[in-house]
Amino acid sequence: MLRKVSAAAATSTKPSALASGPKLGAGAAGSPVMALTPTEGFVLGALAKFTATVATYPLQLAQSRLRSEASSRAAAQTTPAEESAAAEKNNSSDSSGNSHDGSSDSDGTGPASSAVAPVPPPSTTLSCLAAVWRTDGLAGLFNGFETKIVQSVLTSALVFGSYETLLGFMVAPPGGGPSSARAPAPARR
């Protein structure tokens, strides 16, 4: 549960000022300071990461597809020497003396017909998102979302929960708390 603490109480040396638990530093110009429990940090971290992942997952999907397409195109490219060797192999005569130009129709007797031209792959994030939307709809934009949401939400929740736990041990409130083994000695006059 969030607890409000005034700047004066957060910096006070009186143990009674912080009787409800450890509070963190002073706010600007007397504004209240909010402190989180580890459970609150865990839950709020999970909610924040869930919201961020839902909002950005389609963009991550598009980036992944664009990178995958770029790497497969790069792997498929050949050097001009390799292309000429492949063309010469396709144009060579076989043992029966028939010449092959590398193209034929379904029965192998004539040139292949090209009724459908290949569609170029998307080259921008927006064109990739539009292509996924046209082919797969909303479900396509969140393909693989389940795995990503479990991984990222748990990671974020554990980080924020651990942070709040460690912060509670490291920041000693005035008058003692989880991180102070002993209270400072009072000043003598």
Image (tube, grey):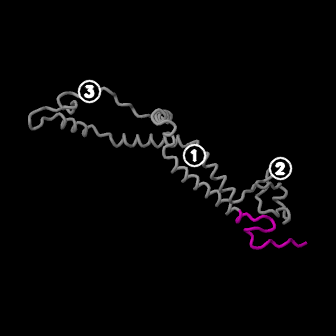
| Up/down of 83 relative to 52, above or below | above
| Up/down of 107 relative to 22, above or below | above
What number is the disc on residue 53?
A: 1
Q: Residues within 10 Å of mark 1 (few under 14, many from 20)?
A: some
Which numbered disc, 1 or 2, marks the residue closer to the eye?
Answer: 1
Q: Which residue is at 25% across, 40% downward?
A: 82
The boundaries of the magenta stretch are 168-189
- Label 3 amino acid? Ser
Q: Is 166 left or right of 102, judged from the image as shown? A: right
Q: Which residue is at 22% across, 30% downward?
A: 105
- The Cα atoms of the two marked residues, 1 and 2, are separated by 36 Å
> Circle 2 sits in a helix, a strand or a loop, which is it?
helix
- The Cα atoms of the two marked residues, 2 and 3, are separated by 78 Å
In terms of secondary structure, what is the magenta stretch mainly? Answer: loop
Disc 3 or 1, which lies upstream in sequence?
Answer: 1
- Label 2 amino acid? Ala
Quadrant in which the N terminus is drawn: bottom right
Q: Which residue is at 78% across, 68% downward?
A: 176
> Circle 3 sits in a helix, a strand or a loop, which is it?
loop
Q: Which residue is at 52% across, 46% downward?
A: 145
- The Cα atoms of the two marked residues, 3 and 1, are separated by 46 Å
Q: Is 148 left or right of 181, judged from the image as shown? A: left
Q: Is 95 left or right of 63, judged from the image as shown? A: left
> Circle 1 sits in a helix, a strand or a loop, which is it?
helix
Q: Which residue is mark 3?
A: 113
Q: Which residue is mark 2?
A: 29
- Check if residue 4 falls in the magenta segment: no
Disc 1 or 2, which lies upstream in sequence?
Answer: 2
Quadrant in which the C terminus is drawn: bottom right
Residue at far left of view: 96
- Kindly indicate the quadrant of the structure image that contains residue 175: bottom right
